[in-house]
Amino acid sequence: ISFFLQKFWTFGDQSREFIHRQILLFSLTALAGLAFNTGLVYALVEFFHQHYLLAQLFSGVLIAIMNFFVYQNLIFRRRL
């Protein structure tokens, strides 16, 4: 559901030509975000002694920003 909302609503990409490639890249981006989130929260809690909720908030905001730019410039970019 997240993929289709991002594709059709957020970025207004109505094409279906590259949808299989987009789904693959979207899934890989989600998995990379999960791995990055896990590592960053672990590092912030264990090494920098931050509260786990603060670490999760910081990580979540950072990943949301990174994902937006990946979606906009790589996955759902407008093709000429």
Image: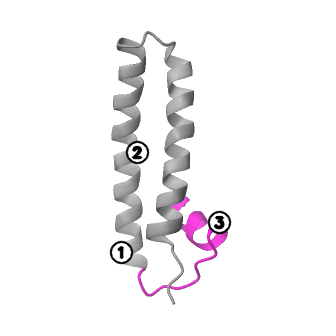
Magenta stretch contains residue 14 = yes
Badge 3 amino acid: Thr
Q: Determine whether label 2 and label 3 are within 8 Å by CB.
A: no
| Vertical order, 62 against 42 (above or below) | below
* Residue 34, percent from left and from top: 38, 41
Q: Tell me the colour scheme of the image.
A: one colour
Quarter of image, res 11? bottom right
User: In the structure shown, which secondary structural element does the residue marked by tag 3 occupy?
Assistant: helix
Q: Which residues are magenta?
A: 1-18
Earlier in the chain: of badge 3 and badge 1, it is 3
Magenta stretch contains residue 46 = no
Query: Residue farthest to the top?
Result: 49
Q: CA distance from mark 2 to mark 3?
A: 19 Å
The label on residue 33 is: 2
Q: CA distance from mark 1 to mark 2?
A: 18 Å
Q: Which residue is mark 3?
A: 10
- Alpha-carbon neighbours of circle 3 within 10 Å: few (<14), some, or many (≥20)? few
Q: CA distance from mark 3 to mark 1?
A: 18 Å
| Vertical order, 33 against 23 (above or below) | above
Badge 1 amino acid: Arg
Earlier in the chain: of badge 2 and badge 3, it is 3
Residue 42 or residue 17, whichever sits in front: 42
| Vertical order, 32 against 15 (above or below) | above
Badge 2 amino acid: Gly
* Residue 26, percent from left and from top: 42, 62
Earlier in the chain: of badge 1 and badge 2, it is 1
The label on residue 21 is: 1
The residue under the point 59% across, 82% down is: 14
| Vertical order, 28 against 53 (above or below) | below
The label on residue 51 is: none
